[in-house]
Amino acid sequence: MVRIRGSIGEWPVDLTLELDEADWDQLSARLGAPLPTAKAESGAPVAKPVSQDDALWQIARDLLRKAGQLSGPDLLEQLEGLTGSAAAGKRLLVRLRHSAQVKVVSGGDTPLYSWTE
């Protein structure tokens, strides 16, 4: 079961997805990597590998945190440069918009993204 909570704009979101073993296997196959098991054969917990998406997400967060505040177009331009693709840059921008550490305020013609921690 996967639970997703947050907001889309001002609308609260609370979504629960129930997946059986076949669903998890299919998802794993599409991602191209097996899903880690809860424990290794030795009984020690298995650390989740860091994916490229996780690394890009961390870099995007750090970029905004260090800047403090950026306009939407400036932030998107930097994210596109980081990812090498307009689509991937937009995905990171949307993810930042919905992050608890980011405040988005309409600044006239363009939104302003501010780090809040």
Image (cartoon, rainbow, N blue to C red):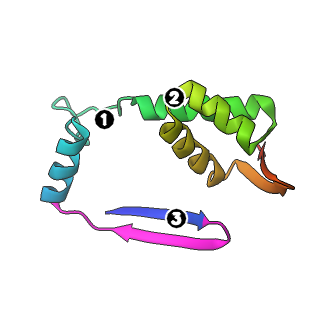
At which x and y percent is residue 2? Answer: 36, 61
- Measuring 22% from the left and 50% from the top, which residue is drawn there? 27
Q: Is residue 9 magenta?
A: yes
| Distance between mark 3 and mark 2 Cα atoms | 26 Å
N-term-proximal mark, 1 vs 3: 3
Q: Quadrant of residue 46?
A: top left
N-term-proximal mark, 3 vs 2: 3
| Distance between mark 1 and mark 2 Cα atoms | 32 Å
- Residue bearing mark 2: 83
Q: Is residue 11 left or right of residue 52?
A: right
Residue range corresponding to the magenta coloring? 8-20
1 vs 2, front mark: 2
Amino acid residing under circle 2: Thr
- Residue bearing mark 3: 5
Q: Nearer the viewer, residue 67 or 20?
A: 67
Q: Is residue 98 left or right of residue 3?
A: right
Q: Nearer the viewer, residue 33 or 113?
A: 113
- Measuring 35% from the left and 29% from the top, which residue is drawn there? 49
At which x and y percent is residue 55? Answer: 49, 28
Q: Residues within 10 Å of mark 2 (few under 14, many from 20)?
A: some
- Residue bearing mark 1: 45
Q: Is residue 80 left or right of residue 24?
A: right
| Distance between mark 1 and mark 3 Cα atoms | 26 Å
Q: Residues within 10 Å of mark 3 (few under 14, many from 20)?
A: few
Amino acid residing under circle 3: Arg
Q: Is residue 51 left or right of residue 35?
A: right
At which x and y percent is residue 94? Answer: 58, 50
N-term-proximal mark, 1 vs 2: 1
Quarter that holds the N terminus: bottom left
Tag 1 and tag 2, C-beta contact below 8 Å: no
Kind of element beneath mark 2: helix
Q: Quadrant of residue 45?
A: top left
